[in-house]
Image (tube, rainbow, N blue to C red):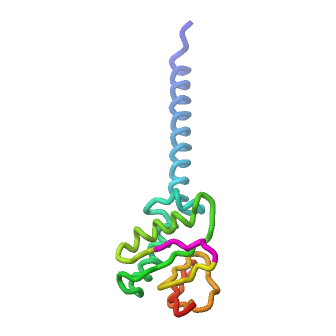
């Protein structure tokens, strides 16, 4: 049994419309995901250039680099998080400040601060730490004494 020509055209038009709707749906899903990249908080282990978290850290550390003499010792104190967040923020800071000696926060009890401290999303309340520069989520301290 052969289908009449108008019915064949109707099925063809339906298939093309279905394919077009599916294509538009998939394109919309991908573009929405692309537009929202970096709006969610991701672990620093998953950061990539061009996303918001490393861009915020980079802008903070650019200001730190302008205020701290080259070759100075910097300690990075960051908010603890999943997936060794403190370690990866320290590594990003080391990469973004190549002319400075960037150290991670010393976890040892009674470890004394020295040089400069960059507090990322974690202000510090220790004697001898004087704030030099402050930006939301980032504070630079100079350590003046024990």
Q: Position of residue 19 (x, y in %)?
A: 52, 34
> Is 107 in the magenta?
yes
Measuring from the top left, give residue 108's x and y in whole percent. Answer: 60, 73
Q: Quadrant of the N terminus?
A: top right
> Residue at 44% of width from left, 74% of height from top?
102
User: Percent from the top left, x then y, of residue 10?
Assistant: 55, 26
**Picture quadrant of residue 66:** bottom left
Front in this rendered view, residue 106 or 44: 106
Q: Is residue 116 magenta?
A: no
Image quadrant where one finds the C terminus: bottom right
Magenta range is: 103-109
Task: Identify the residue shown where x is 51% and y is 24%.
Answer: 9
Q: Residue at 52% across / 82% down in the picture?
A: 117
Q: How many marks?
A: 0
Q: Is residue 144 above or below residue 66?
A: below
Tell me if residue 2 comes above or below residue 52 in the rendering. Answer: above
Which residue occupies the foreground of this view, 97 or 126? 126
């Amino acid at each position: 049994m052969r289908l009449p020509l108008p019915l064949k055209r109707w099925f063809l038009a339906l298939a093309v419309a279905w394919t077009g709707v599916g294509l538009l749906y998939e394109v919309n899903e991908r573009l929405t995901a692309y537009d929202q990249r970096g709006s969610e908080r991701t672990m620093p282990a998953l950061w990539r250039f061009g996303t918001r978290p490393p861009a915020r850290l980079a802008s903070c550390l650019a200001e730190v680099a302008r205020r701290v003499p080259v070759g100075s010792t910097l300690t990075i104190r960051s908010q603890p998080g999943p997936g060794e967040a403190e370690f990866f923020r320290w590594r990003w800071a080391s990469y973004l400040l190549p002319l400075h000696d960037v150290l991670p926060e010393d976890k040892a009890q009674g470890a004394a601060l020295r040089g400069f401290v960059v507090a990322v999303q974690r202000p510090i309340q220790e004697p001898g730490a004087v704030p030099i520069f402050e930006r939301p989520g980032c504070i630079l301290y100079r350590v003046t004494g024990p």
